[in-house]
């Protein structure tokens, strides 16, 4: 087996990327908007939302390693990873729409309904997410091609995540004028339901294509556990490089705030538009909703330029520089940009002046979204070399665990901020009144703004620290890949064409 040989045809690589795009659409529909929907539209009690988001998402994160062990345990005739993608697609779509259905129930019944749908959605999503992001590890034996495929997939995943943002903008600018609504609460229920339906229909068509167009080439024989040998979890915990990557991901949890909290910042920190005095109720609803959509879009454009721009250049950067150096440099730069954003925002609360620094602080998001998956692939190579075992799904599930734990912490932080500064959604958005951010006290507005400035910056600084102890880089990485190739050859493991 030649180290530089490529295995993945262009059509197959494209199919994986398209599937990642569809997955990104559906996940973003949940992760970017569910806290706003629960707090401001359904107006569920903040303490209930906090407990639901925290415990359900932590449980969801724990499910990832469990799912990884299930996937690694058995290879079917259709593959080890692909069948789960097909079987979970329809349930994920149905549950996503049910999540934004807004049924006419009492508050107590509505909380039960929301909790059930939210928890079940997370568990079913895990069934497809873990195998999907494990695919690059079995599609090719070339580490560089694997990293390139992951980078391509994460880039299209990010592009897919922008689709709900586009829908949020378009519906927010057009629908209020078409409907002429004076009830901001009912309008938001219609908006979120439309967004979920459109996202699900397009997303599932793209995502399910992966099953039919991707091939698993690296087939590690199923091995029954032998009494006394280390368990799968034990191997994971003893893999020091992998533990450092996981720690890096946990410490970077605050970076999720830039996207998860953006809609809340749009509601409660900034207002962009004409003066609201003298407007009719319908005009006021239209103006405020247009402002929320516009501010949210500004953050999304910053993410697209910063995060997706970084993703596009990541394949070239990953060929020239050590992964650890890329992480350290970009995270330090993101921290500095976040601090500038904080100072400028505190002095002026002028969103336009903050834009360049918000953009720079989004660059590490793109870097981490790509590079952590590639680093986990290297860690699995290291584990296979040292132990003879390669727990692909469980290793990739560690990244899913980190992502979901990070989102849980970020979303919980948003709810805690609501409670800390005394925001009352039912007084800001109801059938009787809709208030703009400018109606709030300045300290409340800046507190919400800190969710996308101070918090991500400090998180980026912390997440760079574990990388100083990460050793799979440079000549050591090259030597590891050569030894692994020789070991596979000796074990008679062949890579399918």
Image (cartoon, rainbow, N blue to C red):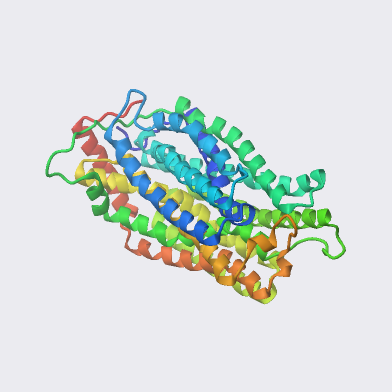
Q: In percent of the image, x 60 and y 70: which residue is there?
A: 422
Query: Outermost residue, bottom direction?
Result: 347
Say which of 306 and 165 sits in front.
165
Confirm whether residue 139 shows in the render: yes
Question: Is 304 left, or right, of 434 in this rendering?
Answer: left
Q: Position of residue 34 (x, y in %)?
A: 56, 50
Q: In percent of the image, x 73 and y 53: which residue is there?
A: 184
Question: Is 450 left, or right, of 254 in this rendering?
Answer: right
Looking at the image, is 31 positioned above or below residue 262? above
Residue 426, picture quadrant:
bottom right
Quadrant containing the N terminus is top left
Looking at the image, is 255 positioned above or below residue 68? below
Looking at the image, is 108 positioned above or below residue 144? below
Q: In percent of the image, x 82 and y 53: which residue is there?
A: 282
Disc count in the image? Answer: 0
Question: Is 287 left, or right, of 34 in this rendering?
Answer: right
Q: Position of residue 486 (x, y in %)?
A: 23, 38
Residue 325, picture quadrant:
bottom left
């Amino acid at each position: 087996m030649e180290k530089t040989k490529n295995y993945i045809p262009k059509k197959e690589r494209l199919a994986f990327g398209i599937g990642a795009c569809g997955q990104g659409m559906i996940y973003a529909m949940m992760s970017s908007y569910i806290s706003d929907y629960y707090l401001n539209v359904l107006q569920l009690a903040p303490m209930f939302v906090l407990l639901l988001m925290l415990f359900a998402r932590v449980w969801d994160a724990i499910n990832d390693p469990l799912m990884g062990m299930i996937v690694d345990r058995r290879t079917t005739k259709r593959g080890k990873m692909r069948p789960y993608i097909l079987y979970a697609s329809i349930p994920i779509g149905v549950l996503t729409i049910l999540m934004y259905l807004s049924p006419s129930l009492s508050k107590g019944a509505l909380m039960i309904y929301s909790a059930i749908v939210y928890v079940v959605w997370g568990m079913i999503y895990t069934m497809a997410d873990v195998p999907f992001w494990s695919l690059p590890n079995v599609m090719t034996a070339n580490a560089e091609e694997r990293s390139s495929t992951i980078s391509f997939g994460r880039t299209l995943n990010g592009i897919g995540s922008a689709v709900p943002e586009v829908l949020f903008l378009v519906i927010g600018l057009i629908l209020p004028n078409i409907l002429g609504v004076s009830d901001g609460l009912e309008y938001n229920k219609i908006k979120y339901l439309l967004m979920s339906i459109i996202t699900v229909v397009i997303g599932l068509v793209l995502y399910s294509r992966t099953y039919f167009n991707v091939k698993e080439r690296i087939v590690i024989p199923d091995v029954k556990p032998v009494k006394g040998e280390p368990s799968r979890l034990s191997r994971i915990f003893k893999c020091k490089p992998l533990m450092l990557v996981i720690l890096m991901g946990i410490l970077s949890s605050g970076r999720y705030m830039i996207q998860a909290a953006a809609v809340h910042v749009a509601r409660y920190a900034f207002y962009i538009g004409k003066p609201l005095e003298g407007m009719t109720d319908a005009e006021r609803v239209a103006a405020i909703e247009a402002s929320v959509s516009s501010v949210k879009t500004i953050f999304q454009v910053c993410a697209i330029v910063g995060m997706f721009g970084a993703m596009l250049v990541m394949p070239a950067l990953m060929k020239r520089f050590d992964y650890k150096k890329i992480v350290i440099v970009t995270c330090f730069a993101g921290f500095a940009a976040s601090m500038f954003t904080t100072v400028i925002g505190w002095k002026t609360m002028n969103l336009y002046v903050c834009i360049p620094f918000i953009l720079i602080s989004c660059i590490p998001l793109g870097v981490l979204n790509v590079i952590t998956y590639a680093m986990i692939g290297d860690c699995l190579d290291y584990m296979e070399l040292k132990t003879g075992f390669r727990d692909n799904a469980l290793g990739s599930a560690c990244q899913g665990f980190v992502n979901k734990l990070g989102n849980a912490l970020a979303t919980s932080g948003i709810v805690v901020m609501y409670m800390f500064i005394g925001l009352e959604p039912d007084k800001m958005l109801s059938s009787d009144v809709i208030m703009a951010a400018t109606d709030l006290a300045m300290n409340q507005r800046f507190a919400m703004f800190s969710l996308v400035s101070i918090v991500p910056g400090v998180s980026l600084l912390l997440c760079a620290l574990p990388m100083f102890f990460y050793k799979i880089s440079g000549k050591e990485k090259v030597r590891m890949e050569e030894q692994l190739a020789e070991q596979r050859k000796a074990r008679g493991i062949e890579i399918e064409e």
